[in-house]
Image (cartoon, helix red, strand yellow):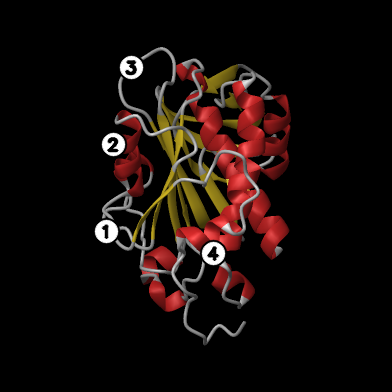
Amino acid sequence: MSPDRSPEEPLAPAALQSRLRTAVFGHRVFYYPTIGSTNDRALDLAAAGEPEGAVVLAEEQTGGRGRRERTWHSPARLGIYVSLILRPLVPATRAPLFTLTAAVATAEALRESLGLQASIKWPNDVVVARRKIAGILGETRGSDPLIREMVLGVGINVNHRREDFSREVLERATSVLIETGAIADRASLLAAILEGFERRYARLVRGQPADLLREWVSLSALPRGRTVVVAGPSGRSEGSMDGVDEEGALLLRLPDGRILRVPFGEIVESSWT
């Protein structure tokens, strides 16, 4: 399609479900033309007993956010703004694995459906040509040792033009349209992501993370051995990437050879070349 054409029709539940081949995820959809945050709504629904597999889908978010309460730019009808309700009943220490799962499913869908060379920057960014195209935000409420309810928010820049981003954001963000020059079918892309997520999620709940971790390593934007600076629970640490463990924590090899486990945080500096 020409990039001069207007964005497609609304990403309505019927359009999504006509493309779905999932057993659980996406068959119950709470759809909003405008909402503050899909994650906030999904957390409320989960607390009220909404079953696993339900999704909150919005055309626009007025209060979309990423990790550390950063703002997620969510203009109407241009992106995918969706939150999934999970009830995995696994130890809370494994929560990061579900974020990794969503990142792998998103990167795979962008690669296979649209031919983009998408990769993952730990823990939750999907990037193309070193610029962020999607982000994942996993959230739970309470301090139960088991995850009884969790939501995963996925935000993807799909049909955004360059002028839809501020100059500051454009330096570090991109979209499907910018990368391919064509308007994408958001419903088909979201269906592919839900299908890929469901396959991997089922294995994780059964306690089988090995395949997921191998996929994550193969899709990592920063390969094993790359020097990075990570901001984690103990402050900033510099070392080389050494993969992730079975709970999704980053493994950082320090200059003295010790392995530092970083359960949460972010990569704040890296050598891309």
- Name the N-terminal-most of marks 4 and 2: 2
Query: Residue 230, image x and y in percent?
Result: 48, 34
Q: Which residue is mark 1?
A: 62
Q: CA distance from mark 2 to mark 1?
A: 17 Å
In the figure, residue 116 lies in which quadrant? bottom right
Q: Which residue is mark 4?
A: 186
Q: CA distance from mark 4 to mark 1?
A: 20 Å
What residue is at 55 percent from the left and 29 percent from the top?
97
Q: Is residue 171 above or below residue 71?
A: below
Amino acid under disc 4: Arg
Amino acid under disc 1: Thr
Q: CA distance from mark 4 to mark 3?
A: 35 Å
Closer to the eye: label 2 or 1: 2
Q: Are marks 4 and 1 in contact (CB under 8 Å)?
A: no
Closer to the eye: label 3 or 2: 2
In the image, which disc is placed on residue 143? Answer: 3
Q: Are marks 2 and 1 in contact (CB under 8 Å)?
A: no
